[in-house]
Amino acid sequence: MITRGNLDVGCIAEEAFQTFAFTRNIKVGNTLNLSGVTPLTVDLEKIEAVGNGVIRAQAVQALGIIKRCLAAEGTTFKNWVMQTVYPTNIAELRKTDDVFRGALGGYSATSTWAEIKGLLHPEQMVEIRGIATLD
């Protein structure tokens, strides 16, 4: 069974999901797939980047949103099994490895970090997508 939804974790207005034609989370059986989580607050009138120009602040914000998404589904980073991290500057992102270790709380996931040219917002420096299992 496939279930699509947009977890309300306080950063993206429901209309934005409709306008940009994406779904925050899709459950397939006991697997939760999260779309790219951004350090943005989005409504139809304004898109703002948290931590402008500071990739550490943006990574903390994105991981915090993921944590809230996982909690809304009754799980934690313990069940976070795969992540893909898209930074606009991988050298800067490498300086945030402690942020990832701290957020994941001693658990690790399969991971790919791939530098890309740009993201949705010109001040956005990172986006994280991933998969968790649900007990």
Image (cartoon, rainbow, N blue to C red):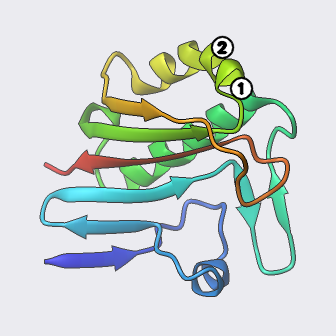
In this picture, residue 124 sits left or right of residue 17:
right
Residue 81 is situated, as x and y percent measured from the top left of the image, at: 26, 37
Q: In this view, does 101 lie above or below 12?
A: above
Q: In this view, does 129 lie above or below 25?
A: above
Q: Tell me the residue that label 1 is attached to.
A: 56
Between marks 2 and 1 in the image, the one whose residue lies nearer the viewer: 2
Q: Which is more toward the observer, 20 or 57?
A: 20
Residue 10 occupies quadrant: bottom right
Precedes in sequence: disc 2 or disc 1 = 1
Q: Is residue 14 above or below residue 99?
A: below
Q: How crowded is mark 1: few (under 14 residues within 10 Å), some or many (20 or more)?
A: many
Residue 76 is situated, as x and y percent measured from the top left of the image, at: 33, 39
Mark 2 touching mark 1, by CB under 8 A?
yes
Residue 7 is situated, as x and y percent measured from the top left of the image, at: 47, 67
Q: Mark 2 to mark 1: distance in Å?
A: 8 Å
Q: Which is more toward the observer, 69 or 92?
A: 92
Q: Residue 95: give its label.
A: 2
- Residue at image position (31%, 39%) is 82
Q: Which amino acid does label 1 sit on?
A: Arg
- Residue at image position (76%, 47%) is 124
Q: What residue type is labelled 2?
A: Lys
- Tell which residue pokes out farthest to the front in this image: 117
